[in-house]
Image (spheres, rainbow, N blue to C red):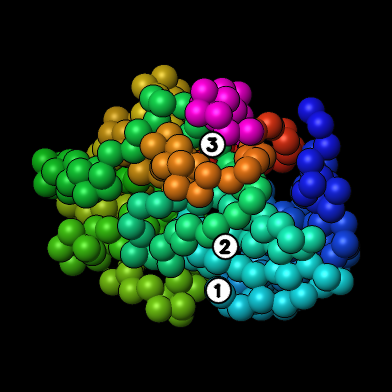
Amino acid sequence: MPRTAAQHWIEPHPHGIFVRPADMWIDPSQAVERALVTHGHADHARSGHGTVWATPETLAIMALRYGTEMGTPVPYGDGFEANGVKISFHPAGHVLGSAQILLEHAGERVIVTGDYKRRHDPTCAAFEPVACDVLITEATFGLPVFNHPPIEDEIRKLLDARDAHLDGCVVVGAYALGKAQRVIAELRRAGYDAPVYIHGAMQKMCDLYEAHGVPLGELIPATGLAKGELRGGIVVAPPSALNDRWARRLPEPVTAMASGWMRVRQRARQRNVELPLVISDHADWNELTETLLELRPSETWITHGRTDALGRWCELHQLKAHALDLVGREDEDEG
């Protein structure tokens, strides 16, 4: 493929995207001196960097996870310049503090989306379309089969299961950063005002969300409670806890899982999930293609996920695209 204008100053490497004039890496999977971080999931926000630039919320998440991580906060819409490259952060709608990074240099505008979604999410700022010449996008759910249903429908399934099993409980597997808080906030939006029981691994992150203005209602640690106290309840726990000794303490649990991968029946069966909830913090196929049609960038670079399918769609719609094949990006359950 011919060398494009942006490729003269942005270098994709397997372990991250290097912005050469600024001497900065975006979401590097290895420790570097200067890192721009899109959001707090561990496959994007690593420890050990010299200096980090990120939103205040992402820096708070990194501090919670890594203890001593320090950095320079960049609120949404604010910008700074690094050796001729203007850099600003814009909402990505993925999790609290998630950002797209806009790079402006040599007359070009390049957007790095990080992970993003366009659905309403009461726990984070909504995705903001940003005009650009080059779009560097994810494609986690880059296949037409991935059309995420309205979250209201999935929350209704969860509440119906709870109502049908008042002698037991429903335990929901949800990733501790973002997904758990979104499920709880959507339960509240649906009118569920009873306490939500949470695994101990989620307490600090839920506290952080509430400290940043995301109300989650009454949360009670499930660990240590008698089975009788949990009957008729909803318990939220990390996916890894669903099938381990911790879950055996729960009263006759119906096992649910909140993930975009629950669209795939085999994934639900592999995890022994009785109630698959198709709830994702990533753009589905329609959102990915809608974004491309709305922005119509001169070029699209696809970082991870189903790069082949989205690349083929771009080709059919006469949009220039190619895959970067970055390493170290996980799917949303382990991310």
Cα separation between marks 2 and 1? 8 Å
Disc 2 on helix, strand or loop? strand
Residue 191 image-quadrant placement: bottom left
Question: Is 301 included in the stretch rendered in magenta?
Answer: no
Disc 1 on helix, strand or loop? loop
Q: Locate residue 203 relative to residue 276 in the image: left or right.
A: right
Q: Are marks 1 and 3 in contact (CB under 8 Å)?
A: no
Residue most extreme to the top: 266
Cα separation between marks 1 and 3? 24 Å
User: In x, y percent, where is residue 170?
Assistant: 26, 45
Cα separation between marks 3 and 2? 17 Å
Q: Which residues are magenta?
A: 303-320
Question: Which residue corresponds to mark 3?
Answer: 140
User: In x, y percent, where is residue 290?
Assistant: 42, 42
User: In x, y percent, where is residue 128?
Assistant: 46, 61
Q: Is residue 198 above or below residue 80?
A: above
User: In x, y percent, where is residue 13?
Assistant: 82, 42
Q: Is residue 110 visible?
A: yes
Please give the name of the residue rendered at 33% of the width and 57% of the height, measured from the top-left corner: 120
Disc 3 on helix, strand or loop? loop
Please give the name of the residue rendered at 33% of the width and 69% of the height, measured from the top-left corner: 216
Q: Mark 2: which amino acid?
A: Ala
Q: Are marks 2 and 1 in contact (CB under 8 Å)?
A: yes
Question: Which residue corresponds to mark 2?
Answer: 99
Label at residue 76: 1
Please give the name of the residue rendered at 88% of the width and 62% of the height, measured from the top-left corner: 21
Q: Locate residue 14 relative to residue 272 in the image: left or right.
A: right
The numbered mark, 2 or 1, whose residue comes first in the sequence reads 1
Q: Quadrant of the N terminus?
A: top right
Question: Is 315 included in the stretch rendered in magenta?
Answer: yes
Which of the two residues, 40 or 274, is positioned nearer the viewer here? Answer: 40
Q: Are marks 3 and 2 in contact (CB under 8 Å)?
A: no
